[in-house]
């Protein structure tokens, strides 16, 4: 005896719309992840449905600052503290970007992370479509470097012209974040990046990514940041002295609005627990700035490094690093 079709099955068969599917919810789940916090709050104030969906978006954002670009999520913590925001809003960049290439928006907080997951596949394909690699470091090796290698401050890795894959030991900094991290709110320092596991000495932690700026644009932005337009800027100037000793290469990386979780690493007057290493690859003119553990870093320990000794302004921002040699004021780059 043939089965009788239910009312819902019959409506679907006839092409009618399922009454249980709310078009508002379907549209909101597509649009809300693209909104910044102010826009999201405005949408939430319109009706209960959007308010509930906005809360879910906020929870998803707090669970992973990397927008699923990295293999390991980096959550925001500290929401229980007084006056602490749920998360810091910024656009995520896996690698350095020219300011002209910087996106205006990214989805963040989608029910599915498929819109951004697997974004590192371009790195993989670039590494595998080379012409053959002759480096001595190829082959799967240890995920860390020896102290003597890191103290040099400059590291050479395989580039796009090499045929080895991302598991090659000589691509240590090109695999993304492979250690557990978390971002914690501090009343004095704002957001801080902490280890969420034991990080052994020599372990690669993360790269400092952001917009690559000309010196002229870097100076213009720094003046705007000093004027108070941003409560916390993340413009980093890297100088690499050339072998001749008569010149240096300057790289301006601004992670204030576009960057990765390295933007939350704070300064320490004693040098901190991270080494800064310039990484060069064949075919790339500019080096990348990467962080390695300078010693064993305990779980829940804050990650920090020295911002440099360019100058200390009398009216500069107060330093809260708490080290015995703290100068009391954050270093300021002469832009």
Image (cartoon, rainbow, N blue to C red):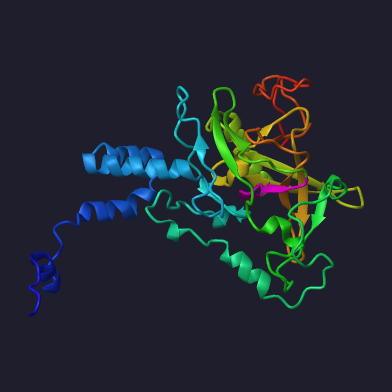
Task: Give the image location of residue 256, x and y in percent.
Answer: 57, 41
Task: Give the image location of residue 174, x and y in percent.
Answer: 68, 58
Is residue 9 shown left or right of residue 249?
Answer: left
Position of 86 relative to 245 (above/below): above
Which residues lie in the magenta part?
A: 202-213
Is residue 308 shown left or right of residue 214?
Answer: right
Task: Give the image location of residue 9, x and y in percent.
Answer: 13, 69
Q: Quadrant of residue 86?
A: top left
Q: Nearer the viewer, residue 170 or 269?
A: 170
Q: Can residue 47 be seen from the camera position used here? A: no
Instruction: Locate the C terminus and report the quarter of the image it occupies.
Output: top right
Q: Residue at x 9, y 71 (%)?
A: 5
Position of 218 relative to 125 (above/below): above
Q: Residue at x 66, y 48 (%)?
A: 206
Instruction: Locate the N terminus and report the quarter of the image it occupies.
Output: bottom left
Q: Nearer the viewer, residue 178 or 245?
A: 178
Q: Nearer the viewer, residue 108 or 194?
A: 194
Most distant residue in the right direction = 244
Is residue 248 shown left or right of residue 259?
Answer: right
Q: Residue at x 38, y 49 (%)?
A: 33
Q: Can residue 48 be seen from the camera position used here? A: yes
Reply yes or no: does residue 140 show up in magenta: no
């Amino acid at each position: 005896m043939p089965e009788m079709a239910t009312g819902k099955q019959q409506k679907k068969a006839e092409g009618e719309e399922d009454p249980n599917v709310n078009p508002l919810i379907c549209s909101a789940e597509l649009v809300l992840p693209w909104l910044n916090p102010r826009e999201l709050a405005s949408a939430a104030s319109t009706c209960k449905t959007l308010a509930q969906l906005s809360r879910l978006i906020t929870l998803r954002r707090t669970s992973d600052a990397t927008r699923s670009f990295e293999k390991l999520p980096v959550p925001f913590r500290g929401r229980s503290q007084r006056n602490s925001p749920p998360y810091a809003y910024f656009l995520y960049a896996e690698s350095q970007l020219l300011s002209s290439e910087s996106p205006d928006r990214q989805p963040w907080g989608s029910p599915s992370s498929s819109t951004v997951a697997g974004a590192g596949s371009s790195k993989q394909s670039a590494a595998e479509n080379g012409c053959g690699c002759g480096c001595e470091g190829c082959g799967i090796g240890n995920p860390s470097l020896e102290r003597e290698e890191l103290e040099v401050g400059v590291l050479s890795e395989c580039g796009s012209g090499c045929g080895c894959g991302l598991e090659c030991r000589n691509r240590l900094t090109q695999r993304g974040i492979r250690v557990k991290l978390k971002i914690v709110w501090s009343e004095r320092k704002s957001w801080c990046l902490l280890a969420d596991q034991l990080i052994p000495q020599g372990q690669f932690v993360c790269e400092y990514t952001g917009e690559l700026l000309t010196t002229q644009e870097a100076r213009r932005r720094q003046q705007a940041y000093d004027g108070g337009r941003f409560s916390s800027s993340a413009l980093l100037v890297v100088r690499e002295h050339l072998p001749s000793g008569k010149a240096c290469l300057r790289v301006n990386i601004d992670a204030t609005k576009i960057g990765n979780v390295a933007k939350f690493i704070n300064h320490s007057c004693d040098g901190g627990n991270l080494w800064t290493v310039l990484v060069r690859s064949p075919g790339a003119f500019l080096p990348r700035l990467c962080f390695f553990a300078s010693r064993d870093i305990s779980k829940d320990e804050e990650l920090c490094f020295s911002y440099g000794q360019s100058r200390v302004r009398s009216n500069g921002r107060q330093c809260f690093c708490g080290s015995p040699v703290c100068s009391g004021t954050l270093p300021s780059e002469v832009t």
